[in-house]
Image (cartoon, rainbow, N blue to C red):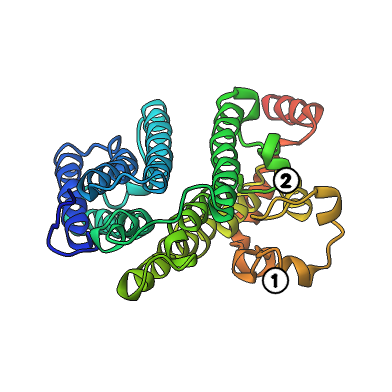
Amino acid sequence: MEVHALDDYYLAITLLITIGYQLFFFSIAFALKFDKLTDFAGGTNFVVLAIITLAFSGHHHARQIVVSLFIMLWGARLSGFLLFRILKTGKDDRFDDKRDKFFPFLGFWVFQMLWVWTVSLPVTILNSPKVTYYKQPDFGTGRDIAGIVIFALGFVMESVSDVQKYNFRSKPENKGKVCDVGLFVWTRHPNYFGEIIIQFSIFMIAVCPAAYGYVHDGAYSALYASILGPFFLTALLMFLSGLPLQERPGAKKRYESGNHWESYKMYTERTSILIPFPPQLYVRMPTILKRTVFLEFPMYVFDPAKHADQSIVRDREAEEARGSEHPSSKLSDQRQSSG
């Protein structure tokens, strides 16, 4: 028998659980100045919400079980990998300017609460009494199958690319080099692309009762409205915390420091920013198509003349010029000074 908790869509109870869960880990992180639990708290929160809403629903239809397992699998893998990585690196540079400041640090955790609660919406609403009240379509519809295939593709892309990038950066000989191996040959951010299609695949399965006309009224609208979850995650990666923090800032840093800039520039010219595409074709793609269809918006593009600090570049080039003086000239200068 289902549990009715605060509202029939489980929106309030999942919000309260998320707030409490994140504040618990925030108190530890702030008190101990400890970075290692931040991403772990985010990923595992998805698992907690899926377990609770599925247990509360009292109707364990195959579709509910599948979408709940999918988001649990994704959340557990993501949190496990990020925990492993932070244990290896020791600290998270994102918090260097926030770790000792209560409200800025809390602000990150509040945003993480919003991220978890919103992205969980398709699973939360599918498991809610308002939806389970209605008869469900048998599992195995075209949308179900398509969702499973897309989830598998996205999960493999995100998981494999995380490992490929970690292994590449772990080798001392690759320090500073452009990661252009494996899936990174086809897209500069295969992990982001995988994460996005994972969330849309979960929505695709969860919305089946509405798509096939089995639920009505508020439940129908709520299931379709839960697309806010995958859209929110996509907007987050494309316009806030993902690509905007890596594309132009990363290129600027490489250009100013001279860190494999030319190879990085060629890599961006031949490799799609997000959507996987053969590099042999992408490099010949008209710029207008790259900036529109392939989502490489102007906000991501680095122009040295506009965005670089040229004084830093001049200082670096002057330092390199001094360091590259011919050894015989240096030796002659030393002999003259000693004479």
Amino acid at dot 1: Thr
Question: On the image, numbered disc 2 is attached to which residue?
Answer: 186
In the rendered image, residue 114, in percent from the top left (x then y), is placed at 29, 60
Which residue is denoted by mark 1 in the rendering? 292
Q: Secondary structure at mark 2?
A: loop
Whole-number angstrom distance, CA of label 1 to CA of label 2: 18 Å
The quadrant of the picture occupied by the C terminus is top right
Q: For this rendering, which residue is in front, 55 or 22?
A: 55
Q: Amino acid at mark 2?
A: Trp
Q: Earlier in the sequence, mark 1 or mark 2?
A: 2
> Would you say residue 253 is visible in this rendering?
no
The percent position of residue 112, horizontal first and vertical second, equals 30, 54
Q: Examine the rendered structure and indicate whether residue 166 appears above or below residue 242.
A: above
Q: Is residue 147 left or right of residue 100?
A: right
User: Dot 1: what SS?
Assistant: loop
Q: Residue 334, labelled with which disc? A: none
Relative image position of residue 94 (x, y in whole percent): 38, 48
Residue at (55%, 52%) from the top-left corner? 141
Q: Nearer the viewer, residue 330 or 12?
A: 12
Query: Does residue 217 lie above or below 92 as drawn?
Result: below
